[in-house]
Image: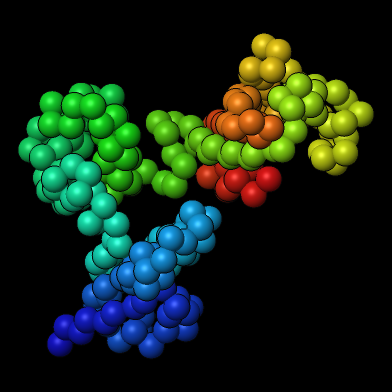
Amino acid sequence: MSKTGIVFPHQLFEQNILASTCNTIYLIEEWLYFRQYNFHKRKIAFHRSSMKFYESYLQSKKIKVVYIDAFNESILKATGKYWEKWFSIILKVGGKKLSRQEIVLVLHKYLKGTGWWEQMITVQFDKKYKNRALYQSGKTFKVSISKVFNFPIERVFDSWINKPVISKWLTNKSFTIRKSTSQKSLRLIWVDYKTFVDVDFYVKAKGKQLSLCNFQNYLLQMNVKRKRCL
């Protein structure tokens, strides 16, 4: 007899009785954990990544997982359709064989002027129907990290090019600078000599500077996850 279970964000246990007794599990992004308050984005990202990891864990045990996204209402409000409706539109035009750029062009016919949602829907479609791993982009893995500093942009930029300063925050051997545009951007080869890094500098507000790093790696997903923790 088929059995169905429900798992909430606070029930992500390795030894879960539902995992051994149910054929299907509904993994729910409970509203209380994701939408009740204006939670910090990092808190939401932590919950989401934990649940997505648990989803993969359950699937590895041959359990059917139905993932309930807490932000379905957000996409409905912004685009007029739920995730599954957008996915069905992409599938009807042969989306599984289309590149990301081609899918974006398909969505642009419906979502003119909402480029962020075009990209977001495309990424989620890829993850669900093309088995793309987390952070995967084509044959590479990419991850972005941003940090706001309460210092002049000159000082933030200098912390990336001044070796004595670099040694204070990067304990192992230094990276290689391929290209530098003063106080705007750096193009680097990371300390492993296999990862390309783009560092861009922006003035976020008076007295606050934003440093945005993009890591691109041709190796394993694990290497990119490691970069994400920097």
Measured as percent of width and height from the top left, residue 88 is found at 11, 45
Q: Name the image quarter holding the N terminus.
A: bottom left
Name the image quarter holding residue 30.
Answer: bottom left
**Whether residue 187 is visible:** no
Q: Name the image quarter holding the C terminus.
A: top right
**Whether residue 101 is visible:** yes
Horizontal arrangement in the rendering, residue 100 relative to residue 56 (left or right)? left
How has the structure been colored for display? Answer: rainbow
Nearer to me, 141 or 7: 7
Picture layout, residue 197 above or below residue 92: above
- Determine the residue located farthest toward the left in the rendered image: 92
Measured as percent of width and height from the top left, residue 45 is found at 48, 56
Name the image quarter holding residue 68.
Answer: bottom left
Residue at the spot 18% in from the left edge and 42% down from the top edge? 79
Measured as percent of width and height from the top left, residue 146 is found at 59, 38
Residue at the spot 47% in from the left edge and 83% down from the top edge? 15
Picture layout, residue 176 above or below residue 51: above
